[in-house]
């Protein structure tokens, strides 16, 4: 930090402050974690300075021998960790991984056959008129993904996202009574819509998914099954999700981030069957430019960490702790979406406290409890104010919290919510944002957190 401070002291100060803040609060954001010193240090090296567009052994730049070592090792670790036929470790983030996967699937399913029919190997050999026809065909494909308000991600066909614009999209949701995926309803929708791509995976669904069933549905309608395991990759790596709940043996393509429950550097990666590998391997130049070599190196380190027995113990604890948190919240009278959890996420409906998600999030933050507001299914408060709070266990489990500590975390959360009232606007009208937190509550909760 002294070196940084000699150039821009405010960045050194902010970095120091971030460490202090992360230590002084309960980090319960379901997508966050604490990467190991080995992962963090690997990200801060001179690999950052190297350009390496292309793939291992096939670069558009000279002098990439060390990047080749790094990328090959990261891919090998990923293949072994997840048992996949192929791994691509270049995507810079989860969104990049999804966009790359979509275009790889389009290349494999639409562009390849189209070029073959046209009798050309390379799209640059197409006439301008044929090129326009191919572009039209690529833009005329269908995607079926889980809706944002029932737990899906923006990139699964949400209209404002590029995935909602580049495909004709429809969304599936959850059963309004149970909050669970209704596979029969999904099958019926898929049969009617006939998507090219069926996307499974979630950001805010507190339950496991049956990927064998998802594959069956995809096969029935001729769709490619793409699973976005960004959130639960750590539970797959740690063998908490096995059999029908492990996406890798069932999906054609699996996308992920490396930084959430997997506890690696910020980044993305893609796993695929041999069939899809050549298309995914063209991520650059299809979607990506130069890979972040320093981050690929850190992915290799994180994958190596995730292969250890200690990581399996950690992943099991993440799920056990989520159950303890859910039970702790429910026994104190709160309402959870799906009445529980069997992954790393708890989705708390705060409407019974007379609060919006925004008010609850802010009050909890004042007390040093860091969560994020999240829609609940058919949320009357929309995606900005919301009626829910999403709580995740990966980060505090990395700090060594167990089921007893998570029961106490549940107690602190309920204490804050019970002592928060919805506020009013300056004109005295009801407000969905302002709130009044009871006197002394924040200090009391901060002091109790420091003891955990
Ligand atoms: N996919 C899922 C399911 C996610 O939850 C997220 C992040 O929240 C992403 C993709 C995007 O990841 P990133 O923020 O790295 O682009």
Image (cartoon, rainbow, N blue to C red):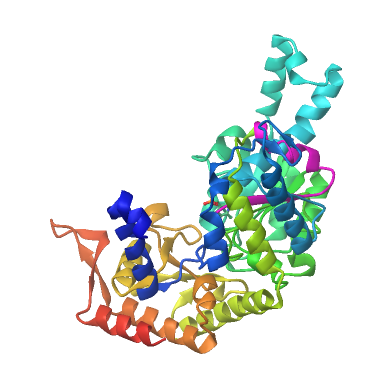
* Labels in figure, total: 0
Q: Position of residue 359 (x, y in %)?
A: 31, 65
Residue at figure coordinates x 38%, y 57% from the top left? 381
11 sits to left or right of 249? left
Q: Position of residue 441 (x, y in %)?
A: 26, 81
Q: Position of residue 277 (x, y in %)?
A: 79, 43
- Residue 195: in magenta span: no
Residue at figure coordinates x 28%, y 54% from the top left? 10
Q: Which quadrant of the figure has residue 298?
A: bottom right
- On the rendered image, what quadrant is the N terminus found in? bottom left
Taking depth in this image into account, of 392 and 375 the one nearest to the observer is: 392
Looking at the image, the residue that sits furthest to the left is 427
- Residue 276: in magenta span: yes
233 sits to left or right of 398? right
Magenta segment boundaries in residue numbering? 266-285
Q: Position of residue 78 (x, y in %)?
A: 73, 58
Taking depth in this image into account, of 249 and 285 the one nearest to the observer is: 285
246 sits to left or right of 388? right
404 sits to left or right of 61? left
Residue at figure coordinates x 40%, y 59% from the top left? 386
- On the rendered image, what quadrant is the C terminus found in? bottom left
Residue at figure coordinates x 51%, y 80% from the top left? 325
Q: Is residue 251 above or below residue 333?
A: above
Q: Is residue 353 above or below residue 411?
A: above
Residue 156 visible within the image: no
Residue 161 visible within the image: yes
Q: Is residue 91 above or below residue 202?
A: above
Taking depth in this image into account, of 449 and 40 the one nearest to the observer is: 40
């Amino acid at each position: 930090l002294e070196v940084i401070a000699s150039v821009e002291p405010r960045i050194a100060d902010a970095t120091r402050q971030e460490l202090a803040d992360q230590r002084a609060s309960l980090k319960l954001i379901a997508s966050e974690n604490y990467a190991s010193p080995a992962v963090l240090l690997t990200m801060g090296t001179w690999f950052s300075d190297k350009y390496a567009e292309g793939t291992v052994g096939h670069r558009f730049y000279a002098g990439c021998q060390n990047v080749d070592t790094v990328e090959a090792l990261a891919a090998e670790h990923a293949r072994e960790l997840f048992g996949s036929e192929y791994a691509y470790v270049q995507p810079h983030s989860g969104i990049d991984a999804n966009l790359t996967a979509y275009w790889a699937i389009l290349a494999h399913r639409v562009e390849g056959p189209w070029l073959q029919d046209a009798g050309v190997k390379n799209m640059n050999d197409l006439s301008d008129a044929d090129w326009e026809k191919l572009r039209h065909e690529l833009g005329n494909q269908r995607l079926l993904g889980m809706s944002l308000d029932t737990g899906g991600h923006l990139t699964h066909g949400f209209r404002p996202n590029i995935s909602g614009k580049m495909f004709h999209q429809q969304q599936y949701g959850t059963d309004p009574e149970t909050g669970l995926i209704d596979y029969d309803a999904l099958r019926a929708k898929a049969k009617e819509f006939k998507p090219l791509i069926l996307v499974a995976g979630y950001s805010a669904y507190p339950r496991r998914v049956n990927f064998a069933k998802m594959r069956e549905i995809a096969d029935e309608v001729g769709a490619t099954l793409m699973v976005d395991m960004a959130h639960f990759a750590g539970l797959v790596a740690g063998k908490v999700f096995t059999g029908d709940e492990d996406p890798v043996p069932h999906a054609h393509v699996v996308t992920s981030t490396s930084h959430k429950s997997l506890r690696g550097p910020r980044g993305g990666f893609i796993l695929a069957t041999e069939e899809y590998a050549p298309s995914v391997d063209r991520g650059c130049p299809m979607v990506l430019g130069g890979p972040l070599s320093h981050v690929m190196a850190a992915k290799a380190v994180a994958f190596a960490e995730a292969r250890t027995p200690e990581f399996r113990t950690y992943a099991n604890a993440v799920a056990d702790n989520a159950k303890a948190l859910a039970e702790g919240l429910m026994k104190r009278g709160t309402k959870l979406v799906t009445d529980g959890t069997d992954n790393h996420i708890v989705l708390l409906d705060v409407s019974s406290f007379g609060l919006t998600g925004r008010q609850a999030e802010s009050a909890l933050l004042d007390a040093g409890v860091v969560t994020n507001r999240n829609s609940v299914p058919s949320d009357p408060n929309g995606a900005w104010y919301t009626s829910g709070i999403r709580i995740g266990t990966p980060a505090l489990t990395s700090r060594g919290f167990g089921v007893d500590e998570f029961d106490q975390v549940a107690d602190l959360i309920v204490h804050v919510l019970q002592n928060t009232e919805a506020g009013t606007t300056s004109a005295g009208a009801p407000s969905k944002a302002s709130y009044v937190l009871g006197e002394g509550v924040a200090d009391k909760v901060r002091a109790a957190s420091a003891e955990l």
